Amino acid sequence: MSTTPLGTLAFYSEFDDFQTWKRALQAQLPHLQVVHSSAIERPEDIHYAMAWKPPQGFFSRMPNLRLIVNLGAGVDSLVAREDLPAGIPITRITDPQMSRMMAGYVLFAVLRHARDIPFFEQAQRLGEWAYRHPRSPDEITVAVLGLGQLGAKAAHEIQRQGYRTLGWSRSQAAIEGVECFAGLETLDSVLAQADIVVLMLPLTPQTRHLFDRQRLEKLRPGAAFVNVARGALVDQTALTDLLRSGQIGAATLDVFEREPLPAADPLWSMPNVLITPHLASVAIPSSSARQIAENIERVGRGEAPNHVIDPARGY
């Protein structure tokens, strides 16, 4: 815990509680000044910025910025900006609690589809005692697309339940109990084998709308689709059409092309769709603050911070 003056950190998020984050950060670094972006009086005094989807121009008025902390795991909302100062490192939060939270959500979604719970939910709404015999886990194939820190943890938890688990990523990965594939040329084959597809890829120029209508039609008929990554990976109109027709049997969706999802969007009323408001995994202040504090101290000593992202790659 540092006891020397560290400068000032500016905070911006429309979704996270400022006071909770301020307390967590100052518990680690009592001499760090933490101010909300709306209370910045002297932008030249800001040395660190912690933000989630800040407005354009947010960083350009901070000439002495030394570190940017993305308030989350996905950094796609930062890397395409025009106001990022050159040479300033951007770090992402890699709190183990986020991996556990994401793995728990994904496991819930997979188990829900594997045990046909949407079928029973619909039967309950109709007042019907409808029986469907459970399938053995080893008869069900689950594909996890994206094997970064969060995806690898989720794939590991899925295979522990006895499901045949496939993993796909841009570069080759190795996860015990998971059949791993790499490269775009193998993606369609992975999709065709899966009863449940879990999307966990980063959003980059290469992955934007990677799941267009043509690729979504590669899914096994009646397969379930889970998206906990980014809405812009998917052509949402095509996904809606395929869910309506039954080509895709069901979906659990935590992310959307437009958030909040508009009230008139047809996905809201589809009985084979479960919607949650982008909460599959979020940064927990009490545990994430330790990692952020360490990076602030490293920068203060003239060292490179940990978990720096590559803006050119988008993650």
Image (cartoon, rainbow, N blue to C red):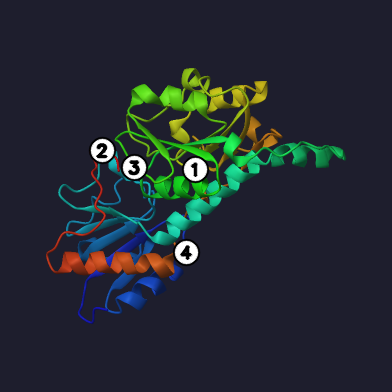
- Report the Cα–Cα distance between label 4 and label 1: 22 Å
Q: Do we see residue 235 in this rendering?
A: no
**In-front residue for pair 118/289:** 118
- Report the Cα–Cα distance between label 1 and label 3: 22 Å
Furthest residue toward left? 302
* Disc 1 target residue: 228
Are the residues flagged by discs 1 and 3 in contact, CB closer than 8 Å? no
Displayed quadrant of residue 266: top right
Image mark for residue 277: none
Q: Earlier in the sequence, mark 1 or mark 2?
A: 1
Q: Earlier in the sequence, mark 4 or mark 3?
A: 4
| Kind of residue sitting beneath label 4 | Asp
Q: Earlier in the sequence, mark 2 or mark 3?
A: 3
Left or right, residue 165 beside residue 297: right
Give the number of the mark in front: 2 or 3.
3
Q: Position of residue 276 (x, y in %)?
A: 59, 46
Q: Position of residue 119 (x, y in %)?
A: 74, 36
Q: Is residue 266 above or below residue 279?
A: above
Give the number of the mark in front: 4 or 3.
3
Q: Position of residue 36 (x, y in %)?
A: 37, 64
Residue at 48% from the left image edge and 17% from the top image edge: 214
Callout 3: 10 Å neighbours few (<14), some, many (20+)? few
* Disc 3 target residue: 174
Q: Secondary structure at mark 2?
A: loop
Displayed quadrant of residue 122: top right
| Count of residue discs | 4
* Disc 2 target residue: 313
Q: Secondary structure at mark 1?
A: loop
* Disc 4 target residue: 17
Q: Earlier in the sequence, mark 4 or mark 1?
A: 4
